Image (tube, rainbow, N blue to C red):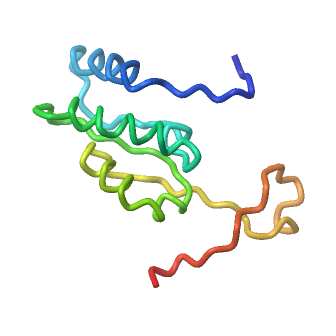
Amino acid sequence: MFGHRPRVKTPAQIMTELDGLWQSGWRGTVFFVRRQFHRQQARVARGIAPALVRWHKGKRGFSFYTEASINLADDEDLMRLMVAAAFDQVFIGSRLPKRQASPNATSAEPEPRSLSPT
């Protein structure tokens, strides 16, 4: 159940689940876990986003959000797809820039980068 292999749903699986939510009367926001839109999984996200655009046509009351790293800002095409697919929020996760700031951290240090738009 809590394995180390991330599982990513196919666009067909996601559309089936969204259809179920729609048919049950759910209206609101749906959260997509980070691994669906992680930078290394951009090809997966590019498969899901166009399917969401098609699914969302004519359906009001649904929006989507996800968590991503700041690197999402490097992929303007994916961001456009996400907006077209009704993503209206993205939580940007961040990590401490120095190992000394969190000696118990087990993840790798992020690459330094400026958050300035220029």
Q: Which residue lies furthest to the left in this view?
A: 58
Q: Where is residue 55 in the image (x, y as percent from the top left)?
A: 22, 29
Q: Where is residue 62 in the image (x, y as percent from the top left)?
A: 24, 36
Q: Quarter-wise, where is residue 110 in the image? A: bottom right
Residue toward you, 65 or 75: 75
Would you say 74 lies left or right of 55 here?
right
Q: Quarter-wise, where is residue 66 in the image? A: top left
Q: Which residue is drawn at 52% across and 51% down?
A: 68
Q: Which residue is drawn at 83% across and 49% down?
A: 106
The number of numbered badges drawn on the structure is 0
Q: Which residue is drawn at 38% across and 26% down?
A: 11
Residue toward you, 73 or 64: 73
- Residue 50 drawn above or below residue 96: above
- Residue 26 drawn above or below residue 68: above
Would you say 51 lies left or right of 97 here?
left
Q: Quarter-wise, where is residue 80 in the image? A: bottom left
Q: Where is residue 97 in the image (x, y as percent from the top left)?
A: 74, 69
Q: Residue furthest front?
A: 43
Q: Quadrant of the N terminus?
A: top right
Q: Residue at x 15, y 31 (%)?
A: 59
Would you say 12 lies left or right of 113 here?
left
